[in-house]
Structures are given as structure tokens and as C-alpha cells.
Image (tube, grey):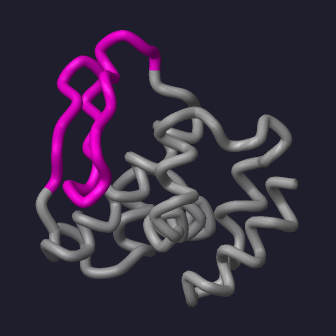
Amino acid sequence: MAVSHYKRGGLAFPSHIPLRDFSLRKPSPLQLVLARGHHWLRILETSEAATMCNNAHREGTNLSYVARHINLTLLVPDIVSRILDKTLSEGVQLLSLATNPPMLWEDQRRWRAGITG
């Protein structure tokens, strides 16, 4: 997967997600977490770390924390776009997005209706 870079903050986003003008805005916490999830997934895909456990140890954190971040890389593109555009409902919490999201995009769209109002 090709990655586009936002140099100021060191953020990396997947190339299939159109980049907006991030130079004018400070990344939101959800944007940072999404970028970290993609970074950690890339570490696994390139075998820099053999497992999520290895990655967590390498990052000085725990497996659950890494897994929740990587779960965000599986979100349907319209949810990711809303994160990047900062148009996701303010009440949506990271934990609700990152903890066991449905795997199928259609299921995520139905699930999102329940968490985004």
C-alpha cells in the first residue's frame, strides 16, 4: 500500500485516502491515532516486527493499545474521510471506533449510524 506523507507532523496516510490541505490545520487526536495505526500496520507488513506483541514491546506499550490502533486501519473509507475532514460527530470516542469494529464495510456503515447519530 502506497503511503502519502504529511511532513510537519510526520503523519503517514494511505494513498487511497485523498489528502486535504493539512498544512493549515493541526491534526486532531483521531487523525493522529489513525496515522499511528497505519504506521504500526506497515511495521507488521514489512516484518520490522513479527507480531503485534513484538510491536507493542518495541513501542513500550501493550498489545491491546496497538491492536486498537490497528483496528482503525480497517474502517470503511467514509468513516476515515470523516476523521480526516474532522466532520465525525464530536461525541464519537476513539474507544467506540477502535474496539471490535465490524469487519464488513456494510456492517460498519450500519454500526456507524449507531455511534455517530
Residue closest to the eye, 110 or 92: 110
Q: Residue at x 76, y 41 (%)?
A: 89
Quadrant holding the N terminus: bottom left
Give the tally of numbered discs.
0
Residue 39 location, quadrant: bottom left
Is 1 on the left-hand or right-hand side of 78? left
Residue occupying the point 21% across, 76% down: 45
Snapshot quadrant of residue 88: top right
Residue 11 position in % (x across, y down):
29, 36
Q: Position of residue 8 (x, y in %)?
A: 24, 18
Judge whether residue 23 is colored magenta: yes
Q: Is residue 117 left or right of residue 87?
A: right
Residue 4 position in % (x across, y down): 16, 44
**Dividing the image into 4 quarters, which one contains the C terminus?**
bottom right
Q: Residue at x 71, y 70 (%)?
A: 99
Per the rendered image, the range of residues in magenta is 3-26
Which percent across, then down, holds residue 3? 16, 53
**Is residue 71 highlighted in magenta?**
no
- Which is more toward the observer, 59 or 100? 100
Instruction: Give whichever of 42, 79 is nearer the camera.
Output: 79
Q: Give left or right: position of 42 versus 31.
A: left
Q: Residue furthest top?
A: 24
Q: Nearer the viewer, residue 66 or 105?
A: 105
Residue displayed at 23% across by 30% down = 6
11 shown above or below 72: above
Q: Is residue 2 left or right of residue 112?
A: left
Location of residue 116 (image quadrant): bottom right
